[in-house]
Image: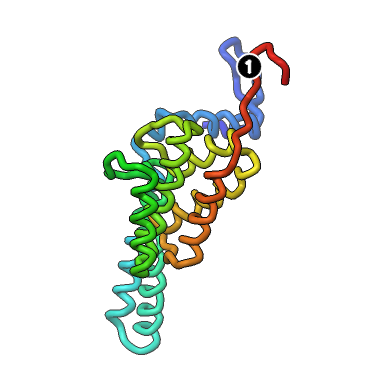
């Protein structure tokens, strides 16, 4: 059988040379076709397989004695930490995603801004800063709705409220964004609420009560 790159006879008897590089490239392109890899394991399956192989190696080493056992124990510990980190990242994703999917009012029924402010002050007086921050942010958003600076819309997130109100109150857009981030970090994240966080939202709420909106000009009208 002729090798790639050798001269062979074509059907008419004329010699033909098959270039070695071209033949290799053609074979590679053929093997890269999806039909040959339809049943290949996915990336996730390959990663899991690699982790399980390492765990088997670590357990086998631990079963030994002396230096081998110590090395296996260290390897097993490292792998366990990596798995724990991966699980934390995976399971923590929904919690981070909640910042952009959960409404600022949650399951709380319709209440006035004054009622939310009263609850916020009551929680603050008791040192319950997480609850105080939640209620104060709700008071801030409800106050904007009562002034018709925001339309009343169930399910609005803190980020959405800050972005929408920031367009009507551009001078306070940055403060609104910071307030929404504070609320998200405390309500759905791992940040511990404190008096400073509550005071930030309370002061902004009072400032916005006196803020005058910037109205967009009517179409075709003067700027």
| Lateral position of residue 32 relative to residue 20, left or right | left
* x and y percentages locating residue 38 in the rendered image: 37, 33
Please give the name of the residue rendered at 38% of the width and 84% of the height, measured from the top-left corner. 70
Q: Nearer the viewer, residue 92 or 169?
A: 169
Report the coloring of the rendering: rainbow
Furthest residue in direction right, as rendered: 222
Q: In the rendered image of this protein, does residue 196 appear above or below residue 114?
A: below
Q: Which residue is mark 1?
A: 218
Tag 1: Cα neighbours inside 10 Å, few (<14), some, or many (≥20)? Answer: few
Q: Residue at x 45, y 53 (%)?
A: 183
Identify the residue shown where x is 38% and y is 83%. 68
Count of residue discs: 1
* Residue 191: image location, x then y, percent: 44, 63
Looking at the rendering, which quadrant does residue 25 occupy? top right
Q: Is residue 123 left or right of residue 144?
A: left
Q: Nearer the viewer, residue 161 or 20?
A: 161
Q: Position of residue 180 (x, y in %)?
A: 49, 49
The answer, for residue 188, to whether it is visible in the render is no
Q: Observer-nearest residue: 182 or 16?
A: 182
Residue at the image position 30 percent from the left and 74 percent from the top? 60
Q: Is residue 125 left or right of residue 171?
A: left
Quadrant in which the C terminus appears: top right
- Please tell me whether residue 31 is drawn above or below residue 196 in the rendered image: above
Question: Is residue 166 in view from this perspective?
Answer: yes
Q: Where is residue 160 shown, x and y percent of the image?
A: 48, 38
Residue nearest the observer in this picture, 175 or 111? 111
- Say which element carries label 1: loop
Question: With respect to residue 16, does 180 lie above or below?
Answer: below
């Amino acid at each position: 059988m002729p090798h790639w790159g050798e001269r062979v006879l074509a059907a008419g008897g004329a010699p033909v040379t098959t270039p070695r590089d071209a033949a290799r490239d053609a074979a590679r392109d053929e093997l890269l076709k999806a039909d040959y890899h339809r049943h290949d394991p996915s990336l996730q399956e390959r990663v899991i397989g690699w982790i399980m192989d390492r765990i088997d190696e670590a357990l086998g080493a631990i079963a030994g004695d002396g230096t081998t056992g110590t090395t296996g124990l260290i390897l097993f510990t490292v792998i366990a930490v990596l798995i724990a980190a991966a699980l934390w990242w995976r399971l923590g994703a929904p919690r981070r995603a909640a910042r952009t999917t959960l409404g600022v009012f949650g399951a709380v029924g319709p209440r006035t801004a004054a009622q939310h402010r009263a609850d916020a002050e009551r929680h603050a007086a008791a040192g319950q800063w997480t609850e105080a921050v939640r209620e104060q942010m709700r008071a801030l958003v409800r106050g904007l709705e009562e002034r018709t600076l925001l339309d009343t819309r169930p399910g609005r997130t803190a980020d959405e409220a800050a972005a929408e109100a920031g367009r009507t109150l551009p001078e306070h857009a940055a403060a609104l964004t910071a307030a929404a981030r504070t609320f998200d970090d405390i309500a759905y994240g791992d940040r511990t609420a404190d008096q400073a966080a509550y005071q930030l939202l309370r002061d902004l709420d009072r400032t916005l009560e006196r803020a005058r909106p910037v109205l967009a000009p009517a179409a075709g009208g003067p700027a």
